[in-house]
Each structure stands twice: as structure tokens, then as C-alpha cells.
């Protein structure tokens, strides 16, 4: 051990003063920022009813009208195949019998063919047979079948694998269960509340404690490595360490939310339970834990990390803490700005919906479905929005160093997971600007994003995911049902536990 210590390089006695600015040219091309900004501007123009310039502008942005024409053709084809298929009407009786009436061209052709066959086979029969044949052919148009599931989204979001024999599970299913992220005790029901029952309030302080404890714990370990080795952490190991730390925190948060849901119940729980992990998407959910954190942290390391600056160099200044407190709230606002216009564009511009529809297959999401999405949506949310937010704060004179960006990321991801939990509490997204936002009626509650999923494509509202600033300014706030102010219980408060 003495020989090994003797071979270590001498610790650096001095470090350059901490400054979070780094050149913007190498990782973030101006063309990318320009096109992304133009795209967001066009979506904003569309939202504010300036629809006349949108097609030509989008054609210029993506390089011609061919892509738009192909997109329109694809959307039209989908509408013909899906919208022209079958109309489902549910008869209002006690047995909930479903009546399916065929209305598509294909179904009509099949009915006519069967009717002609029936008519030809009965031509040699008596007139009584003809009348029975006519009633038989008429019955082809409307057929009564046994009861079926009314919730069509469940048919494409079926989760039966937790009930299957464990010997049939694949690697991803076993991994999620071993991490206790996909509990198999589906029979254990959470309490069900009427919409008028009071919802307990969750104090801001317990959320700040949870976030800062885990964010600072990762920085303490980082500083310990630097102090022991006398050298800065290599970017490769830096990314791996912080990906591990973030996933550890998120997994812990998801487990806590499961416990809180079993204690307080879930939003809309008197009507519908929480959706599980779909049979066809277990692997996608598993890898989303690493893609979401890995992509963001890799970009953070590339843009803002310097091996010459240790955590203690940054955190040792009171001025750094004051500046970071402002950056936390500002970063949430800027992230939400870009997220809002991209997100609303996905709902308002028809040909963009196909890139967002997978995320909306769930109407009652659980925390593991926070990043369950199409590849295009993943790229925008995991990379483009954070990069644009970093560039914006830099342009505003508030550049993010790696350590303050790490703390900001913890706040953002904490809120993203909570927003998909559906836990029936009145929880306002934690922020250093929370008091101001609440006073202006621009704060984000858990129920806001839950209602967004329930309301669907065209009439969802609540497009923000960190605040309601942009929803309030652009008139897309949806009224709360269970956590409106008059229904909040501030006496029997809930707490976000640390462990």
C-alpha cells in the first residue's frame, strides 16, 4: 500500500477560478439551433392561428414539399383505414353488450356478397324461406357479440405478462421485477376516492430535501474520488457515475411513489386503475431509464465539464449557491418554454401527431411510462430541448456549469416522474420560483399532466410539464377536478419521504 501511494501524482495545489462558460461552437452547431428555433417559431405561429404561412414555411424548413405531400398521404391513408373501419355503439343495458355496425366499404361489400349468396340459395325455396332469407341478410349489418372492453386504449396497451408463469419471462421482465419496479401483486388495490374527497397537500420543503440530498450525495462522492486520486474525473467515468446516480435516484423515487399511491390512492381511481407496462413494451421501458439519463448527461459533460474544476471549487462559494438558486427556476421555465411549443405542435399539427401517439397510448400512466415514446419524441425531449435551454441561458448571461446543471436536471426529472405517477395528492412541482408561480396561478400540479393524458389528442390542454406559465399565457390550461384549491387538505399534509 505504501508503494502504491508513493506512485500517485502529487495533488494539484491550485485550480483555475471556477467559471461555467465553455465555447459553444464544437458541440452545438448554429444550424441545429437555427432550424430548431425556426421550427418552434412556426409551431407558435400555427398555435396563434397564423395558419396561412405554415405549409410554405415548413416546406422551406425540411427542404421541399415532397415530404409534406407524403405526410398528408400517410395521414389520409391512416384515416381511411382506421376511421372508416367500424363504428362501435354500446347499448345502455345492464350487461354492457357491444353492438358492432359495419360501415366501411370492405365490410359493405362483404355483406352484399353474403346477401346475394343467400338470395341465390333460397330462390328455389318457398316464399316463407325468402322472407327468412331477407331477415337473415338484414341481420348481417348489425351483429350482437359478447361483452368487450370499452377502453380501446387498453386493447393496444395490454399488460398481462406479470400474471404469466415466471419461466416465460424474458430478461427485461425479470430485471424490472427484481428491481421492484413492476410489482406482480396486481390484486393489491389502492384506496379509491370520490372526486369530491379532499386531496392531501405535499409541502415544498420535503421535495427540496429529497432532490438536494440525492443531487449533493453524487457530488460528494465525486469530490471524494478527486481528493483521493488528486486528479479530475475522466469524462467517461464522470458520465457513467452520474448516470448511475441519477438512475438510482429515479428508481428510488418510483418505489416511493408506488407506496404513496397505495396509501393515498390514484387520480380518477374510482373509474380506472393505473396502466401497467405493456406486453410489447417491457424492453422499451427498461432501456428508457438509460437513454433518458445517458443522453442528457453525455451532452452535459461535453458542453460544460472541465476536469480542472472539482465540485468543491464550485460549491464552496456562497455566491455560487445564490446564482444556482436562480438558475434552477430559470432553467425550468426555459425548458418548459421549448417543451410547450414542441408538445403543442405535436397535438395541433396533424402530421406531427404520429411522432407522439405512442406516448398517449396510456390514459392513466405510471412513472415508468414517463419516457415511453417514439424515437423522434425521445430525440427532441432528451437532447434538443435541453441543448436549446442551455444555449438560451448562456445567451441570457446565466451559463450553466456542469454541477449547477446537474442540480437543475435533478429538479426537472423529479417533476417528470411525478407527473406520470397519478398519485392522488396536491403536489406542486418544486422550484425556487414556486411561490411566485403559485401567486400568479401558474404552478404545475400532478393532476395537470394526468388530465392531459386522459383528454387525448385534440382536446388535451396542459401542455407544459414543469410549470403552467405557457399554458396560462396561451390559454391551454384545463381545470383541475380533484386537486382544485377548494378540495385541497392543508391540515393533513403528505410528505415526500427521504428514504
Image (tube, helix red, strand yellow):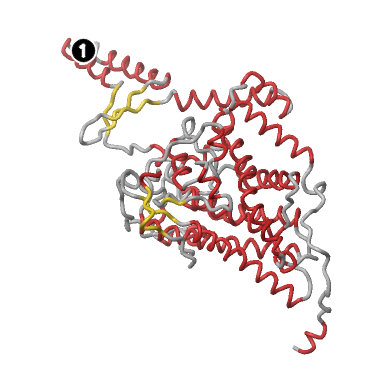
Q: Which residue is mark 1?
A: 130
Q: Nearer the viewer, residue 396 or 499?
A: 396
25 to 257, vertically: above or below: above
Q: Residue furthest bottom?
A: 2
Whether residue 80 sits left or right of residue 222 in the image: it is left
Residue 215 found in image quarter? bottom right
Q: Residue at x 40, y 45 (%)?
A: 483
Whether residue 321 sits left or right of residue 74 in the image: it is right
Q: Position of residue 451 (x, y in %)?
A: 44, 40
Q: Secondary structure at mark 1?
A: helix
Q: Nearer the viewer, residue 38 or 330?
A: 330
Residue 484 found in image quarter? top left
Q: Residue at x 43, y 49 (%)?
A: 422
Whether residue 16 sits left or right of residue 498 in the image: it is right
Whether residue 114 sits left or right of residue 297 in the image: it is left
Neighbour class for label 1 at 10 Å: few (<14), some, many (≥20)? some
Quadrant of the drawing holding the N terminus: bottom right
Q: Position of residue 320 (x, y in %)?
A: 71, 60
465 to 60, vertically: above or below: below
Q: Position of residue 415 (x, y in %)?
A: 53, 51
Q: Residue at x 55, y 62 (%)?
A: 249
Residue 264 found in image quarter? bottom left
Number of marks drawn:
1
Q: Nearer the viewer, residue 352 or 472?
A: 472
358 to 294, vertically: above or below: above
Q: Position of residue 235 (x, y in %)?
A: 75, 62
Amino acid at each position: 500500500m505504501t508503494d502504491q501511494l508513493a506512485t500517485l501524482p502529487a495533488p494539484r495545489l491550485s485550480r483555475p477560478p471556477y467559471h461555467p462558460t465553455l465555447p459553444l461552437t464544437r458541440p452545438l452547431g448554429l444550424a441545429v439551433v437555427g432550424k430548431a428555433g425556426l421550427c418552434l417559431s412556426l409551431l407558435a405561429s400555427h398555435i396563434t392561428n397564423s395558419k396561412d404561412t405554415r405549409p410554405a414555411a415548413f416546406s422551406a424548413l425540411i427542404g421541399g414539399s415532397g415530404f409534406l405531400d407524403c405526410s398528408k398521404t400517410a395521414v389520409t391513408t391512416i384515416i381511411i383505414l382506421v376511421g372508416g373501419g367500424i363504428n362501435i355503439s354500446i347499448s345502455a343495458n345492464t350487461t354492457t353488450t357491444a353492438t358492432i355496425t359495419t360501415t366501411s366499404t370492405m365490410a359493405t361489400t362483404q355483406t352484399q356478397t353474403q346477401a346475394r349468396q343467400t338470395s341465390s340459395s333460397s330462390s328455389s325455396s318457398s316464399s316463407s324461406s325468402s322472407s327468412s332469407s331477407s331477415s337473415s341478410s338484414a341481420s348481417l349489418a348489425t351483429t350482437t357479440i359478447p361483452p368487450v372492453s370499452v377502453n380501446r386504449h387498453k386493447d393496444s396497451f395490454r399488460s398481462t405478462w406479470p400474471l404469466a408463469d415466471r419461466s416465460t419471462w424474458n430478461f427485461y421482465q425479470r430485471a424490472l421485477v427484481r428491481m421492484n419496479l413492476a410489482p406482480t401483486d396486481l390484486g393489491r388495490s389502492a384506496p379509491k376516492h370520490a372526486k369530491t374527497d379532499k386531496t392531501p397537500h405535499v409541502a415544498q420543503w420535503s421535495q427540496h430535501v429529497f432532490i438536494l440530498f440525492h443531487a449533493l450525495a453524487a457530488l460528494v462522492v465525486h469530490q471524494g474520488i478527486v481528493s483521493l486520486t488528486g486528479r479530475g474525473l475522466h469524462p467517461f467515468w464522470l458520465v457513467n457515475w452520474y448516470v448511475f446516480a441519477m438512475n438510482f435516484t429515479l428508481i428510488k423515487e418510483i418505489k416511493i411513489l408506488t407506496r404513496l399511491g397505495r396509501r393515498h390512492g390514484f387520480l380518477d381511481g374510482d373509474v380506472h386503475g393505473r396502466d401497467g407496462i405493456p406486453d410489447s413494451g417491457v424492453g422499451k421501458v427498461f432501456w428508457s431509464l438509460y437513454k433518458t439519463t445517458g443522453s442528457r448527461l453525455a451532452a452535459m459533460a461535453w458542453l460544460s465539464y472541465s476536469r480542472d474544476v472539482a465540485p468543491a471549487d464550485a460549491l464552496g462559494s456562497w455566491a455560487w449557491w445564490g446564482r444556482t438558486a436562480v438558475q434552477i427556476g430559470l432553467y425550468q421555465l426555459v425548458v418548459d418554454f421549448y417543451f410547450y411549443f414542441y408538445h403543442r405542435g405535436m397535438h395541433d399539427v396533424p402530421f406531427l401527431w404520429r411522432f407522439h401517439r405512442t406516448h398517449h397510448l396510456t390514459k392513466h400512466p405510471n412513472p415508468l411510462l414517463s419516457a415511453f415514446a417514439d424515437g423522434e419524441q425521445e430525440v427532441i425531449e432528451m437532447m434538443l430541448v435541453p441543448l436549446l435551454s442551455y444555449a438560451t441561458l448562456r445567451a441570457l448571461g446565466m451559463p450553466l456549469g456542469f454541477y449547477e446543471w446537474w442540480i437543475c436536471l435533478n429538479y426537472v426529472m423529479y417533476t417528470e416522474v411525478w407527473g406520470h405517477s397519478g398519485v392522488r395528492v396536491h403536489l406542486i412541482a418544486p422550484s425556487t420560483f414556486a411561490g411566485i408561480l403559485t401567486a400568479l396561478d401558474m404552478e404545475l400540479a400532478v393532476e395537470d399532466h394526468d388530465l392531459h393524458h386522459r383528454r387525448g389528442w385534440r382536446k388535451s390542454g396542459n401542455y407544459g410539464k414543469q410549470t403552467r406559465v405557457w399554458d396560462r399565457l396561451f390559454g391551454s390550461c384545463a381545470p383541475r377536478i380533484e386537486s382544485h384549491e377548494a378540495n385541497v387538505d392543508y391540515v393533513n399534509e403528505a410528505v415526500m419521504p427521504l428514504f
